[in-house]
Image (spheres, rainbow, N blue to C red):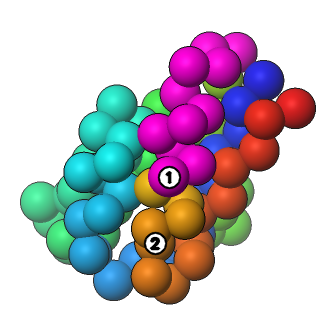
Amino acid sequence: MVIITLQRNKCIGCNYCVELAPNQFQMSKKDGKTVLLQANNKKGFFTLKSNDDSIFEDSDNAAKACPVKIISVKNI
């Protein structure tokens, strides 16, 4: 299972996550911050749990590229 967590309120809108993992992230036209697609929000932490292990590599690369380190990716 892949678990992706995003602290959206700290996003600076650099777009790296969208470029590296476009199936998981997109930029909001409303405020210019990233959106973790199909995620649940709990107190500003957006979390996606997926049984699709194929999303791990792209999502992990997005997390590593994030300059403000607000993306966490785990494969458990």
The vertical placement of 67 against 61, above or below, is: below
Which quadrant of the structure image shows residue 75? top right
Amino acid type shown at disc 1: Asn
Report which residue position mark 2 lands on: 66
Stretch in magenta: 51-61
Which quadrant of the structure image shows residue 2? top right
* CA distance separating discs 2 and 1: 9 Å
Report which residue position mark 1 lands on: 61
- Classify the position of the N terminus by image quarter: top right
**Residue drawn at (62%, 15%), measured in percent from left and top?**
52
Q: Nearer the viewer, residue 31 or 67?
A: 67
- Classify the position of the C terminus by image quarter: top right
User: Tag 2, which secondary structure?
Assistant: loop
The vertical placement of 13 against 51, above or below, is: below
Residue 52 counted in the magenta span: yes
Q: Residues within 10 Å of mark 1 (few under 14, many from 20)?
A: some
Which quadrant of the structure image shows residue 40? top right
Residue 29 lies, in percent from the top left, at 12, 60
Residue 36 lies, in percent from the top left, at 44, 47
Query: Is residue 46 visible from the viewing direction of this image?
Result: no
Amino acid type shown at disc 2: Cys
Q: Left or right? Give the position of 18 relative to 47.
A: left
Q: Nearer the viewer, mark 2 or mark 1?
A: 1
Residue 22 counted in the magenta span: no
User: Tag 1, which secondary structure?
Assistant: helix
